[in-house]
């Protein structure tokens, strides 16, 4: 075998997955057909949940100063994300190119083998391993690994070659995205609905303006090269009456509103993550963020199976947990598309939804949906409000230590938070110490106590979700440990 896992695609999902696998000591090769990163930034910023994921790996400081905001939208209608108590605010202006750079440097520093200019031309699940045919600088070669993960985007060769079913709806329109220098336009961060479509204007660093242009009635085109900036300027003129043809394009792209999702995230030894598994209208910048979270969910599970610490059945929970998240993503982006991109016939619906958003419960619900903070996995029965939800940030103090629930996850391992100095629980966890860290400390301040919902102990998975809590879980601690971390050694 050439590696324990081969990852195809060096975008955000592929780099996040490579880093997660290396944290667990897994040998990973990343194959990327492009010689260099494109520098393009379809994704812009992070949702609150992605901010937490990066914080739980100690990555946020690598991005430098991040502009944050609690103002968001749902289909172009303003939503106050500040209603989500105890959460990070969203990052607004981090370009995807920077995200890819940070994640690649992180994965490389951990020892990931990233091979650019290596295009996968064919693959086959041979039962005991996956074999891939690769065309690279040294010519054709064949690589094998026990598992392969396709993170190779919406037109995934891995998905097509492995026979994944990808049902959904085809694109009905074409839209433009362009980063342009030399324009002086009033920002429209959540967009503006116009009689002929929608525009969005966002200022980026370096005097660059991000434009999104959605003109109703434009049929989708299958392009082999990016559109010309003249097409963007012409559509802008038709929609707004303004001339932006003097702008200097940095890069131009087009996208559609196709909506598809694979019926299974795993077929044997081949798995999919990110856009390879789901494509949708990029409403609210959720695509890249969901892809990163796919990788965070899969990485530790795949590592545990590869290293023989957990049974292969653990990989089934990847589909069980992330497929519903993808379904929810497609649902909300389709709803936002109807609100944002439809004609005046939808205005009454926009008015009603805008009125409903003013109710805090509705605003909180929509903010949780778009941010990814509403996710709750089925980790077992119980009455604890924490079960299956993401672990909130809580500052912790113990005998000579000051830490936090976030910092405890930096190593990418499971964590038992012993909040009541319970020696019995620590003894029951001892047989899993090679996979689970024990932190004996109490929450600092009333806010931390409230976020822990009266729990005396919490078992947190490496991806930051609560697998067990006391009191409130129907299963006992060893049962939860074995389910998520494999048999005791």
Image: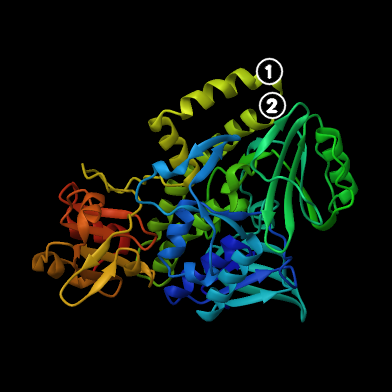
Eyeballing the image, is 387 above or below 347? below
Which disc number belongs to residue 407? none
Image coordinates of residue 420 in percent, x first then y, are 12, 62
Q: Residues within 10 Å of mark 1 (few under 14, many from 20)?
A: few
Residue 419 occupies which quadrant of the picture? bottom left
Q: Residue at x 53, y 74 (%)?
A: 106
Residue pictured at 64% horizontal, 21% vertical: 347
Residue 429: % across, % down: 19, 67
Task: Identify which residue, 391 or 383, lies in the foreground.
Answer: 391
**Residue 74 screen position, x and y as percent:** 55, 36
Mark 1 = which residue?
345
Label 1 – label 2 distance at C-alpha: 7 Å
Q: Quick one: quadrant of the N terminus?
A: bottom right
Find residue 475 and report its horizontal and vertical position in percent: 19, 50
Residue plotted at (41% across, 62% down): 301
Where the C terminus falls, by quadrant? bottom left
Seen from the viewer's position, the closer of residues 301 and 186 is: 186
Residue 339 falls left or right of residue 198:
left
- Callout 2 secondary element: loop
Would you say 488 lies left or right of 42 here? left
Assess whether mark 2 and mark 1 are in contact (beta carbons under 8 angstroms): yes
Give the answer, above or below, for where 248 lies relative to 128.
above
> Is 454 located above or below residue 55 in the figure?
above
Q: Is residue 147 above or below residue 258?
A: below
Tag 1's secondary structure? helix
Residue topped by disc 2: 342
Label 2: few (<14), some or many (≥20) within 10 Å?
some
**Can residue 128 be seen here?**
no
At x 46%, y 60%, the residue is 296
134 vs 439, nearest the viewer = 439
Residue 149: which quarter of the image? bottom right
């Amino acid at each position: 075998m050439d590696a324990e896992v081969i990852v195809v695609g060096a975008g955000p999902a592929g780099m996040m997955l490579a880093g997660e696998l290396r944290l667990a000591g897994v040998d990973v090769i990343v194959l990327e057909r492009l010689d260099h990163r494109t520098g393009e930034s379809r994704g812009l910023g992070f949702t609150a949940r992605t901010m937490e994921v990066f914080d739980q790996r100690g990555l946020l400081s690598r991005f430098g100063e991040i502009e944050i905001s609690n103002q968001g939208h749902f289909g172009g209608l303003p939503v106050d994300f500040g209603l989500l108590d105890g959460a990070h605010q969203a990052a607004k202006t981090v370009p995807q190119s920077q995200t890819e750079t940070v994640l690649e440097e992180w994965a490389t520093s951990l020892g990931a083998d990233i091979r650019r200019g290596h295009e996968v031309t064919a693959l086959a699940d041979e039962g005991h391993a996956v074999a891939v045919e690769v065309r690279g600088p040294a010519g054709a070669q064949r690589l094998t690994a026990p598992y392969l993960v396709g993170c190779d985007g919406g037109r995934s060769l891995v998905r097509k070659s492995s026979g994944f079913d990808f049902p959904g709806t085809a694109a009905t329109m074409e839209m433009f995205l362009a980063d342009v220098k030399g324009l002086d336009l009033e920002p429209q961060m959540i967009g503006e609905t116009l009689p002929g479509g929608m525009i969005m204007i966002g200022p980026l660093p370096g005097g660059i303006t991000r434009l999104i242009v959605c003109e109703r009635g434009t049929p989708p085109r299958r392009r082999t090269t990016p559109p010309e900036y003249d097409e963007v300027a012409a559509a802008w003129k038709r929609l707004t009456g303004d001339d932006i043809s003097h702008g200097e394009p940095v890069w131009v792209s087009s996208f559609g509103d196709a909506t598809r999702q694979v019926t299974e995230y795993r077929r044997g030894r081949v798995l999919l993550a990110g856009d390879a598994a789901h494509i949708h209208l990029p409403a609210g910048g959720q695509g890249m963020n969901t892809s990163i979270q796919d990788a965070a969910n899969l990485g530790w599970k795949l590592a545990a199976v590869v290293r023989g610490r957990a049974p292969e059945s653990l990989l089934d929970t990847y589909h069980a947990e992330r497929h519903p998240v993808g379904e929810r993503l497609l649902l909300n982006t389709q709803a936002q598309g109807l609100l944002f991109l439809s004609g005046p016939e939808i205005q009454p619906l926009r008015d009603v939804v805008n009125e409903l958003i003013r109710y805090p419960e509705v605003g909180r619900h929509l903010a949780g949906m778009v941010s990814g903070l509403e996710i709750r996995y089925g980790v077992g029965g119980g009455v604890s409000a924490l079960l299956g939800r993401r672990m909130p940030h809580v500052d912790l103090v113990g005998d000579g230590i000051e830490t936090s629930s976030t910092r405890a996850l930096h190593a990418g391992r499971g964590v038992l938070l012993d909040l009541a100095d319970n020696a019995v629980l620590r003894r029951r966890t001892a047989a899993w110490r090679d996979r689970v860290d024990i932190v004996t400390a109490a929450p600092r301040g009333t806010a931390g106590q409230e976020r822990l919902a009266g729990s005396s102990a919490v078992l947190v998975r490496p991806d930051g979700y609560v697998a067990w809590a006391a009191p409130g879980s129907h299963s006992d601690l060893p049962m939860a440990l074995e389910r998520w971390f494999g048999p005791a050694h």
